[in-house]
Amino acid sequence: MDHIFPEVNLGGIRFDLAAIIMIVITSIIVFIIAKLAVRNASVTNPTKMQNFLEWVIEFVQNIIGTTMDLKKGRPYLTLGIAMIMYLFVANLLGLPFGIITEAHHGAAFAGMELNLHGEEEAHIAWWKSPTADVAVSGALMAIVIVLTHIEGLRRNRKHYLKHYFEPYAAFFPLNVIKEVAKPLSLSLRLYGNIFAGEVMIGVIMGMGWFGIPALIVWQGFSVFVGAIQSFVFVMLTMVYMSQAIVHEEHH
């Protein structure tokens, strides 16, 4: 029996319950962290959580500063902070443990039938990293696409539209493909790394007691990968944003 994720059919649309639950949990964790960081905020006597949040803000400011003028990029500071905190928590949620239940074909959840893909009996995985779901990573990518194009049209309309026809008008189709491929690769990179990490954890756990040392090492490596992927996603988001809103004369 394979581990599958629970899906609910509503009006012909499939909803992954595990992904939805994990998205909510991730949002709650990030909100709690932010709330604790600003509670009793003090200039003279900051708490450890306040110091942590200030470090995150400075870290994101440095990311923005390496991609564009900080004055132009300051409006995206909140976006960068929210994105890097959300991604870091989301990338790591599937590492500590898993929640697996057994279900039979036709089982119901909250009055709705679960889709077990034709399996008579299956192990249902309820706990995973949200970013290990291609739909979640794709949704984050869609946010980046929409914001990038909106900001390009709002703050740099003339040169933003012009760059689609550079260096010649015949390059328009290639430039469109390039604009689509950049965020697409961004989401697939995030999904691929996190999903592969969780698959490896499952393989190692199948080794039983002999896999414990390898599991400890892989867990540590997965934390590193989760942090790197959060950084890369935010960095490339700011790079794409700077390419849309910043016009360099030598271009």
Image: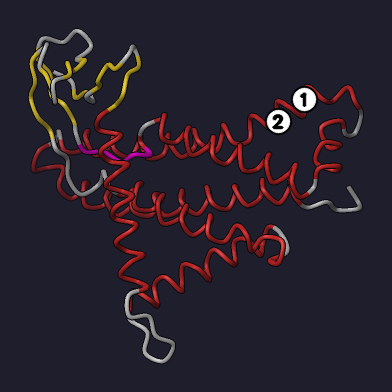
Amino acid, disc 1: Leu
Instruction: Give how far apart the Cα atoms at labels 2 and 1 are.
Output: 6 Å
Binning the other alpha carbons within 10 Å of mark 2 as few (below 14), some (14 to 19) or many (20 upward) gives few
Binning the other alpha carbons within 10 Å of mark 1 as few (below 14), some (14 to 19) or many (20 upward) gives few
User: According to the image, label 1 marks what residue?
Assistant: 174
Residue 232: say if magenta.
Answer: no
In the image, residue 94 lies at what x, y percent? 26, 43
Residue 130: say if magenta.
Answer: yes
Label placed on residue 101: none
Q: Nearer the viewer, residue 201 or 84?
A: 84
| Residue at the (54%, 63%) spot, across then down | 60
Q: Which of 209 and 6 is in front in this view?
A: 6
In the image, residue 221 lies at what x, y percent? 34, 51
| Residue at the (17%, 40%) spot, across then down | 98
| Residue at the (59%, 61%) spot, across then down | 63
In the image, residue 124 lies at what x, y percent? 16, 26
Q: In this view, does 25 lie above or below 36?
A: above
Secondary structure found at label 1: helix
Residue occupying the far bottom of the picture: 44
| Residue at the (74%, 46%) spot, across then down | 154
User: According to the image, label 2 marks what residue?
Assistant: 178
For residue 239, side relative to residue 123 (left or right): right
Badges 2 and 1: C-beta atoms under 8 Å apart? yes
Secondary structure found at label 2: helix
For residue 200, side relative to residue 137 (left or right): left
The overriding secondary structure of the stretch rendered in magenta is loop
Amino acid, disc 2: Lys
Q: Is residue 149 visible?
A: yes
Q: Is residue 222 visible?
A: no
Range shown magenta:
127-131
Split into 4 quadrants, where in the image is the N terminus?
Answer: top left
